[in-house]
Image (tube, helix red, strand yellow):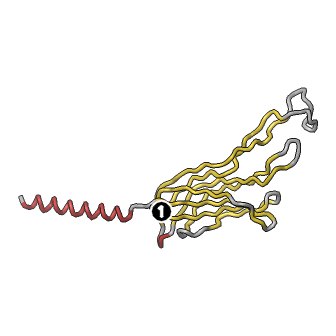
């Protein structure tokens, strides 16, 4: 039965070649660097920076930030009115200022990377003085599908709000082992 051993050897060689090809195309991880910034009257405030590792052909989710109390309700029946300092706030909403991102990365032609997903980012500008003080929070939400060159930072969103200034999102991707 020499033909059986030849067939077995041929199958073994083809499996080895296929495994070698799969190893060469096995995708590395990608480090995504996200910058959320704000400019006002030409001056850029210190941006927030986030990094996440995403498997090539996979996705990862990142949630980061600080929760701020925002007044949501005033007084109770029979209590003094809002303008009266004796009246109290009865309820707060808590808003997260930071970043929530769910992103996927896919290889593209010429070594470029496609990044898809959603980013919700917010920045604290300051506080509006009052009774009580209220935080001024700028928010950007974006569903993205961009193709970028590894290592190159891309500003893929910028908005201007009269009370907050300009907000922007930048993204860079670098393959890593």
* Residue at (42% x, 61% y) in the render: 27
Quarter-wise, where is residue 40 in the image? bottom right
The residue that label 1 is drawn on is 176
Q: Nearer the viewer, residue 120 or 126?
A: 126
Q: Is residue 31 left or right of residue 161?
A: left
Q: Position of residue 99 (x, y in %)?
A: 64, 52
Quarter-wise, where is residue 17 in the image? bottom left
* Residue at (56% x, 50% y) in the render: 61
Q: Is residue 17 left or right of residue 131?
A: left
Disc 1 crowd rating (10 Å Cα; few below 14, some 14-19, many 20+) is few
Q: Secondary structure at mark 1?
A: strand
Q: Is residue 104 left or right of residue 84?
A: left
* Residue at (58% x, 50% y) in the render: 62
Q: Position of residue 36 (x, y in %)?
A: 67, 59
Q: Quadrant of the N terminus?
A: bottom left
Quarter-wise, where is residue 117 in the image? bottom right
* Residue at (12% x, 62% y) in the render: 6
Judge whether 112 appears above or below 31 on screen: below
């Amino acid at each position: 039965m020499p033909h059986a051993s030849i067939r077995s050897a041929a199958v073994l060689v083809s499996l080895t070649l296929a495994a070698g090809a799969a190893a060469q195309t096995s995708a590395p991880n990608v480090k995504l660097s996200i910058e959320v910034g704000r400019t006002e009257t030409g001056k850029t405030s210190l941006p927030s920076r986030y990094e996440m590792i995403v498997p090539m052909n996979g996705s990862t989710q990142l949630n980061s930030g600080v929760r701020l109390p925002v007044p949501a309700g005033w007084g109770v029946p029979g209590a003094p009115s809002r303008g009266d300092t004796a009246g109290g706030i009865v309820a707060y909403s808590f808003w997260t200022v930071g970043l929530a991102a769910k992103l996927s990365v896919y290889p593209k032609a010429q070594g470029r990377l496609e990044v898809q997903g959603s980013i919700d980012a917010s920045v604290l500008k300051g506080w509006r003085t009052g009774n009580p003080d209220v935080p001024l929070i700028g928010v950007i939400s974006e569903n993205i599908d961009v193709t970028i060159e590894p290592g190159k930072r891309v500003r893929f969103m910028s908005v201007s709000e009269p009370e907050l200034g300009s907000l922007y999102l930048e993204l860079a991707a670098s393959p890593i082992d």
